[in-house]
């Protein structure tokens, strides 16, 4: 095996290791809407009430074609479509403030929640 081949192998391994470490360092959240009239944001198995400011990955599971998942807050305005069902993953930078997640079609019926982000 040549020195050039070993160097290339090590470079590929280092890039893979860096990407895996960076991904593991980003906290993960789950957003879920439907199939009934429920909507939530969780960190692991716990409902989110307070988070530290920073970058998060949120996996949204939209389980109904009559609902959507809409996240609104300082610098964030992301949503799925009402007729969309499936999963999407967003990387969001959450700043200090109040965030609302809601189904736009049913927010007036109480299909919404909030959480706070602190510094």
Image: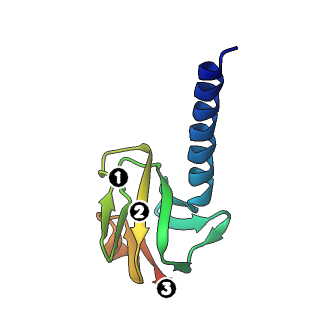
Above or below residue 98? Residue 104 is above
Q: Which residue is mark 3?
A: 118
Quarter of the image for the N terminus: give it.
top right
- Describe residue 113's horizontal placement relative to residue 48 as left or right: left
Above or below residue 88? Residue 46 is below
Q: Earlier in the sequence, mark 1 or mark 3?
A: 1
Choose between 112 and 28: the one closer to the eye. 28
- Describe residue 45's horizontal placement relative to residue 65 as left or right: right
Q: Which residue is mark 1?
A: 66
Q: Which residue is mark 2?
A: 92
Circle 2 SS class: strand
Choose between 40 and 64: the one closer to the eye. 40
- Describe residue 5's horizontal placement relative to residue 67 as left or right: right
Q: Earlier in the sequence, mark 1 or mark 2?
A: 1
Asked if one can make out residue 32 in the rendered structure from this viewpoint, the answer is no
- Residue 106: x, y in percent? 33, 67
Please identify the residue farthest to the top as the structure is shown: 1
How many circles with numbers are drawn on the protein? Answer: 3
Q: Residue at x 40, y 77 (%)?
A: 95
Q: CA distance from mark 1 to mark 3?
A: 33 Å
């Amino acid at each position: 095996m040549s020195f050039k081949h070993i160097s290339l192998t090590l470079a590929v391994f280092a890039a893979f290791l860096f990407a895996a470490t960076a991904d593991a360092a980003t906290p993960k959240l789950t957003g879920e809407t439907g199939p009934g009239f429920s909507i939530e944001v969780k960190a692991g198995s716990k409902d989110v009430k307070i988070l530290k400011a920073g970058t998060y990955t949120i996996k949204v599971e939209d389980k109904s074609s009559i609902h959507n998942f809409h996240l609104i807050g300082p610098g964030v305005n992301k949503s799925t479509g009402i007729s969309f069902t499936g999963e999407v993953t967003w990387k969001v930078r959450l700043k200090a403030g109040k965030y609302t997640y809601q189904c736009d079609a049913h927010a007036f019926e109480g299909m919404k929640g909030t959480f706070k982000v602190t510094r």
